[in-house]
Image (cartoon, grey):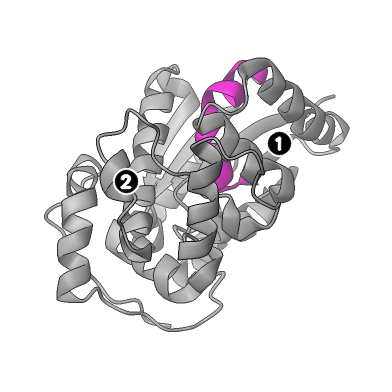
Amino acid sequence: MTATPFFIVSSGRSGTAMLHKALSAKPNVEMHHEYAVQITQPLAVKRYLGLMGEAQTRGLIGDTFGAAIHHSRARLWGDSSNKLSWLIPDLAALYPDARFVHLVRDGRKVTSSYFHKLGAENYDDHANAVMQAHYDGAAFPPPPEKPYWWPVPRRNDPMAEAFRSFDQFQRICWHWAEINREILDSLAALPAERTLFARLEDLTRSPSHVRELLRFLGLEYQDSDFAVFARPHNVNRPEDRLLTPLQRARFEATAGPMMARLGYADRAEYAVNY
């Protein structure tokens, strides 16, 4: 019997590793974190920017995820990955029984984490220039390494021109806002019973939200499940930095509307205790 797939989609730095750990502990679940990322990251960027069409994208997804899901011995097969956020319509069409969890976190915490903890791995000047040149028509594509494969705005994006003069932090702000816009718009096209919206802050503070998540996936809640959410995961540097006044102003200019859309507009910036 083929497993039923589900996908945790997010901006990244939002608790995907935590959900991977929590769901891996449940019986009859085969859980992954950024499954086949060396394939999905370039694929996601190419698909978002229109550099790869529907047929080729879905063929590659089928060859990659389809094989893993088909051969799984678990009842549920899941992947918790920000890369899949750009591929939701393709995944939904290929796997009509799949469910999607939109995992969000306060954008100020996400952008600070990306900027301070991943460093040159995301949106550094050189890699971003290579990606921008590729989108602009340069014949030689970026190398396959992860730092090169972060999307730039589409040509019709109102921020496309401004983005070219952004610094690394501003690019990360754009990414957080745009990837969440893409997720929201893609999931709005699906039946409500296939989607769940979850804030990381709620999952770490209230067992009822963890119970709702597990119920959505068809899993039984136990009191021990909430303990997994009590401390941060995937922390390569156990430190937390609040945004500087300049960063806060730049974040608000780029991502303020998305903060409101996700329900964070009136929430104070918080510190994480490791």
How many neighbours does mark 2 have within 10 angstroms: few (below 14), some (14-19), or many (20 or more)? Answer: many
**Which residue is at a point 31% across and 33% down the rendered structure image?**
157
- Quadrant that contains the C terminus: bottom left
Q: Which quadrant of the figure contains the N terminus?
A: top right
Kindly indicate the quadrant of the structure image that contains residue 73.
top right
Q: Is residue 271 left or right of residue 204?
A: left
Amino acid identity at mark 2: Ala
Q: Position of residue 193 (x, y in %)?
A: 45, 22
**Which residue is identified by label 2?**
177
When the figure is inspected, residue 274 is found, relative to residue 221, above or below; the finding is below
In the rendered image, which quarter is residue 171 located in?
A: bottom left
Residue 12 % position (x, y): 48, 54
Whether residue 7 is visible: no
Residue stretch rendered in magenta on the structure: 79-94
Q: Decide which of 187, 257 is in the foreground and name it.
A: 257
Q: Amino acid at mark 1?
A: Leu
